[in-house]
Image: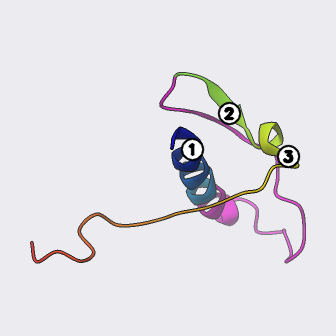
Amino acid sequence: MKAICLLVVLGLLVCCAAARAADLKPGDPAPEFALPGSDGKTHKLSDYKGQQAVVLAWFPKAFTGG
């Protein structure tokens, strides 16, 4: 579960970094970056190279009335 949450955060941050990496083209490799995790460790994109990625994203209030 922690790995999935970490991948979600990494995926969202990669998307947010798109403005900074405007010169990237479709098919280019993602630039290296490192982010602090909720476990206190720093996680780098290269730490997950060669592993299968699963990105889950949701908004908690998406299907609620309030």
Using the image, tell me which numbered label, if any, was put on residue 49.
3
The magenta-colored residue range is 14-39
Using the image, tell me which numbered label, if any, was put on residue 43.
2
The residue lying at 9 percent from left, 72 percent from top is: 66
Measured Cα–Cα span from mark 1 to mark 3: 14 Å
Is 30 within the magenta?
yes
Using the image, tell me which numbered label, if any, was put on residue 50.
none
Q: Indicate the amino acid at tag 1.
A: Leu
Which of the 4 quarters of the picture holds residue 48?
top right
Left or right, 42 with respect to 25, comes to left
Q: Earlier in the sequence, mark 3 or mark 2?
A: 2
The residue lying at 62 percent from left, 64 percent from top is: 15
Numbered disc 1: secondary structure? helix
Say which of marks 2 and 1 sits in front. 1
Q: Indicate the amino acid at tag 3.
A: Lys
Which of the 4 quarters of the picture holds residue 18?
bottom right
| Labels 2 & 1 near each other (Cβ < 8 A) | yes
The residue lying at 23 percent from left, 68 percent from top is: 61
Left or right, 58 with respect to 34, comes to left
Measured Cα–Cα span from mark 3 to mark 2: 12 Å
- Neighbours of disc 3 within 10 Å: few (<14), some (14-19), many (20+): few
Left or right, 51 with respect to 39, comes to right
Residue that carries the numbered disc 1 in the rendered image: 6
| Labels 3 & 2 near each other (Cβ < 8 A) | no
Q: Earlier in the sequence, mark 2 or mark 1?
A: 1
Is 19 within the magenta?
yes
- The x and y percentages for residue 10 are 62, 50
